[in-house]
């Protein structure tokens, strides 16, 4: 545990010692800020709100699209973060120090994962603060907002775990970033439903594999155990595969 925390602290500090960490925070916040203003304008236009649904409140109209956009931005941002975690260290042979240290592969993976999720927790908190500002002049459904923030954080953890696994497989950071983005993009595309889609078991299973399907429940305020289980299983499997890869590198495979 101490080894994992030491690795997490070192990696977390390194994210803010380079322009990358601050730049990604600023860019994501700028884009979601623009989306926030646009959705606020939608809410202030009564005909548009009426066209959506008479029962939709401020939180549903403004915050839900905000978190949905943030999810897509994380799809772009997380590969840049995870490619540095293991792949870049592999390229520079710095990973040899970790592999030679008297710490377990589990501690290495856990430390890397905690550092990145800690950084992304800050990002999710900053995104959540935007709709919270509306409390100064309106009312929010705090339960719905909490569910949306939880869904976005679970998604960020899922992206991070998968990105770490991809990062452990390649010596080239760019390759690991492209692989992470490509696979996660494909799982997003699986949520698309065409007009000719059949409601058979195979189609349902294909759609179920998409993270967007499970995030949508949180955006509607539904914290379903099936959706939580999807993210938890995805995270566990990815981290286990990453740990297996690190253990293999230590054995010289």
Image (cartoon, rainbow, N blue to C red):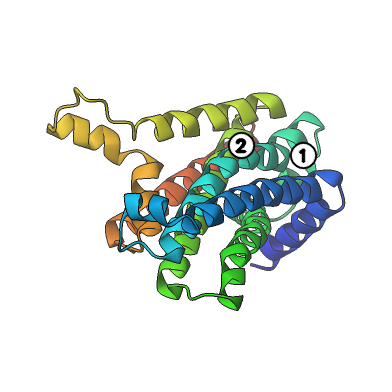
Q: Quadrant of residue 133?
A: bottom right
Q: Quadrant of the C terminus?
A: top right
Q: Closer to the observer: label 1 or label 2?
A: 2
171 relative to 191, above or below = above
Graded by Cα atoms within 10 Å as few (under 14), some (14 to 19) or many (20 or more), the crowding at tag 1 reads: few
156 relative to 208, above or below = below
Give residue 2's position: percent from left, percent from top: 69, 68
In this rendering, the count of numbered labels is: 2
Residue placed most toward the observer, 124 or 87: 124
Residue tagged by mark 1?
A: 96
**Rendered residue at 13%/33% (across/down):** 199
**Rendered residue at 86%/47% (across/down):** 18
Give residue 162's position: percent from left, percent from top: 52, 41
**Rendered residue at 58%/44% (across/down):** 74
Is residue 22 at all visible to an observer of this figure?
yes
Q: Earlier in the sequence, mark 1 or mark 2?
A: 2
Q: Is residue 215 left or right of residue 69?
A: left
Residue placed most toward the observer, 39 or 92: 39
Q: Is residue 197 left or right of residue 22?
A: left
Residue tagged by mark 2?
A: 76
SS at circle 2: helix
Cα separation between marks 1 and 2 = 29 Å
Is residue 154 at all visible to an observer of this figure?
no
Q: Are marks 1 and 2 in contact (CB under 8 Å)?
A: no
Give residue 135's position: percent from left, percent from top: 56, 76
């Amino acid at each position: 545990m101490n080894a994992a925390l030491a690795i997490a602290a070192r990696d977390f500090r390194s994210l803010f010692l380079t322009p990358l960490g601050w730049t990604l925070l600023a860019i994501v916040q700028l884009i979601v800020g623009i989306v926030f203003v646009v959705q606020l304008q939608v809410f202030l236009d009564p005909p548009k709100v009426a066209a959506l649904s008479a029962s939709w409140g401020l939180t549903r109209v403004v915050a839900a699209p905000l978190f949905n956009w943030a999810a897509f931005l994380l799809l772009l941002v997380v590969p840049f973060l995870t490619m540095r975690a293991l792949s870049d260290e592999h390229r520079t042979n710095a990973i040899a120090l970790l592999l030679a240290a008297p710490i377990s592969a589990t501690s290495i993976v856990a430390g890397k994962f905690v550092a990145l999720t800690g950084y992304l927790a800050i990002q999710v908190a900053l995104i959540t603060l935007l709709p919270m500002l509306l409390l100064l002049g309106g009312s929010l459904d705090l339960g719905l907002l909490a569910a949306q923030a939880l869904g976005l954080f679970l998604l960020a953890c899922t992206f991070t775990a998968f990105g770490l696994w991809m990062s452990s497989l390649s010596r080239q950071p760019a390759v690991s970033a492209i692989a992470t983005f490509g696979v996660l993009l494909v799982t997003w595309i699986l949520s698309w439903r065409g007009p000719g889609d059949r409601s058979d078991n195979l189609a349902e299973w294909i759609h179920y594999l998409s993270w967007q399907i499970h995030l949508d429940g949180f955006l509607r305020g539904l914290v379903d155990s099936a959706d939580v289980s999807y993210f938890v299983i995805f995270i566990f499997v990815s981290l286990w595969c990453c740990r297996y890869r690190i253990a293999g590198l230590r054995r010289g495979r």
